[in-house]
Image (cartoon, rainbow, N blue to C red):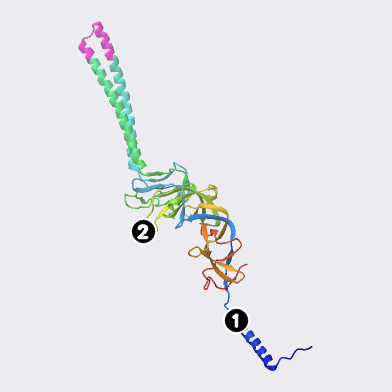
Amino acid sequence: MHGKPLSPLVRRLLIGLAMIAAATLLLWWLTRPKPIPVVVKEVTEGRVESTIANTRAGTVEACQRTKLSTIMGGRIEYLGVKEGDHVKKGQLLMKLWNEDQQAQAALAASQIELARRRVAEACIVAANAEREAVRQAELRVKGFVSVGKEDAARTDAQARRAACNTAKADVAQAEARLKATRVEQGRTVLYAPFDGTVAKIVGELGEYSTPSPPGVPTPPAIDLIDDSCLYVDAPMDEVDAPKIHHGQPVRITLDALPRQVLPGKVRRVAPYVLAVEKQARTVDVEVDFDRPQEAKGLLVGYSADVEIVLDSRDKVLRIPTAALQEGSRVLVYNPDTHQLEERKVKTGLANWEHTQVVEGLSAGERIVTSLEKEGVKAGAYAEPTNP
């Protein structure tokens, strides 16, 4: 049994409705909001550390470094080293002209010799006079000489002994004079106070070398460093200073060694704040290398960055720190609606790379990290550009 055929009017109405529905769908398709390509990151478990880093580049320093200058000025007569030379402790590095002091030393030495000969002469005479005084005393007892003659012999012996002692004092004086001239010569020479490397020399053979007077910054004659022991000196923000303590672990990176991280430990925190004009107030922190052999070959003066680890936790939920917005908010990608949802989270430890999430997210959820893109906000349609 066949149904009653549709009337032409009904057919036209149905066709019109179908066309309207198709047009509406086409219009929605053409005017629908285009999804924003975003970079998402999955919430995972891992290690999170709380760290602080230096405010400005630190510097590789030598454990021993001295800038040497002669106490007196003068013409450079001897220069026994060149820049880059390795020297031993006690090695003569530089000497100024000091022939006048050498002449005075020679004179003092000859005076010592003369004084010693006078001692020998005076003390021999004194010994003879003392023997004569004893003989005169024995003769007086026997009645052969008078008391006056005995007294005269004893007085002469005492005078001769005093002359002997005076001559000995002259020797001591001459020796002191020689020592003084040698001290004066020491004002014109430079010796290496430790084994090291000559980093810089100011002056050439025959030039005049001038010591640094008080308050006048004059370059030193020789800059000597001991590069067998190195450390890093880095300025830290004064706000972070109370968190830093001796022995804390540190990661050291250098521009000279890209993609290489050297472990270290805090060895000293400066007991004062350094205030430099037009710069933030900082506290200098010194860091030792855990494995000094890895620092071999580094040059003093290399720039270095330090990251001090304050605390760390393993197997905690973490997200990229770049995904956090003001107020501890993140944008979560909903794969069902393809929209971005705002979520407030509770955070824990954090550093520049990762932040611990205590509440608000679950493992496996995906959050947006490309927050700088235009249109990225809650409710926006999005399309992940990474798996």
143 drawn magenta: yes
Alpha carbon separation for disc pair 1 and 2: 62 Å
Front one among 2 and 283: 2
Magenta part of the chain: 132-151
Kindly identify which numbered label has been placed on residue 180: none
89 drawn magenta: no
Front one among 250 and 77: 250
Which residue is painted at 25% across and 6% down in the image?
142
Front one among 320 and 77: 320
Name the residue that disc number 2 marks. Answer: 277
For label 2, the crowd category at 10 Å Cα-Cα, with few meaning under 14, some 14 to 19 and many 20 or more, is few
Residue 255 visible in image: no
Which residue is painted at 27% across and 9% down in the image?
138
Which residue is painted at 58% across and 68% down in the image?
333
Residue 364 position (above or below residue 107): below
Instruction: Choose the circle earlier in sequence order: 1 or 2.
Output: 1
Give the residue type that dot 2 points to: Glu
Q: Quadrant of residue 144?
A: top left
Can you say which quadrant of the picture contains the N terminus? bottom right
Task: Specify the principal SS of the magenta part.
Answer: helix
For residue 377, side relative to residue 211 (left or right):
right
Residue 188 spot, x, y in % from top left? 36, 44
Element type at marker 1? helix
Kindly identify which numbered label has been placed on residue 28: 1
Residue 67 spot, x, y in % from top left? 40, 48
